[in-house]
Image: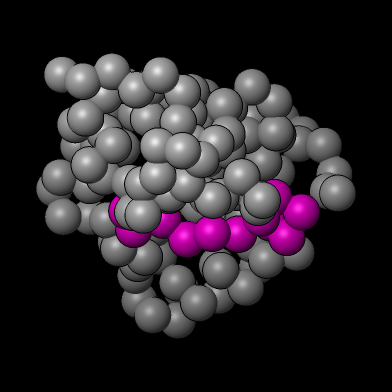
Amino acid sequence: AYPSPSGKQPEPLPREQVLAKLKGGNELLGSDFLLVDLRSNDHDGGTICGSINLPVQSLYPAIPTLYTLTEQSGHRPTRIVVAVGSSQGRGHQAAGCSRNVLAHQGDNETQSADLRGGIKGWARAGRKYTEWIDAYDTNKRVKQRVTEE
């Protein structure tokens, strides 16, 4: 779907840091971070508030457009966080690929990372996380033995 990332692979971002950003009111596109949900069919069941859905197969060709949109708005994010189902492979690859495309655009400052544990890890972490999932449906794929806190 897209080339393998080159260079140092970005470190996954812990969900606690993403939640802190959301609670700080930075959940919208154009704030200091951009959260991209890369799931397509498994997007059913909810998505983290403020994220945009861009199926993984569309990511590589869309990054330059996203970059241009945020640049023109005057609110280029300092970090792009990609989220997949479980963050066990394609999340790491997508984060690395994003980093490479940004570098090709001449941006060596914007960081790229995948959400550690993905959407399923987010949902499993309990209520303080699931309350940040838009259209959360426990009968859909995002459900993975959610614990209450």
Q: Residue furthest bottom?
A: 72
Q: Position of residue 15 (x, y in %)?
A: 34, 28
- Seen in the image, is 53 located left or right of residue 34? right
Q: Is residue 144 above or below residue 79?
A: above
The stretch of residues the image draws in magenta is 49-60
In-front residue for pair 113/144: 144
130 and 34: which is toward the camera: 130
Farthest-out residue, front: 139
Please name the residue shown 26% across and 45% down the image: 132
On the picture, is 19 further left or further right than 42?
A: left
Question: How far across and how far down the image is residue 67, in percent?
Answer: 55, 67
Instruction: Please tell me how many numbered marks the rendered image carries.
Output: 0
In the rendering, at what x and y percent does residue 8 appear? 65, 26
- 81 shown above or below 93: below
In the rendered view, does 65 fall on the left or right side of 53?
right
> Residue at point 54% right, 51% down?
44
**Residue at the spot 76% in from the left edge and 54% down from the top edge:** 57
Q: Residue at x 19, y 37 (%)?
A: 20
Answer above or below: position of 9 versus 101.
above
Is 41 above or below relative to 12? below
In this view, the residue in front, 101 or 14, is 14
Dividing the image into 4 quarters, which one contains the C terminus?
Answer: top left
As for residue 55 lying within the magenta part, the answer is yes
User: Which of the pair 19/149 is nearer the observer?
Assistant: 149
Position in image of residue 48 (x %, y %): 37, 47
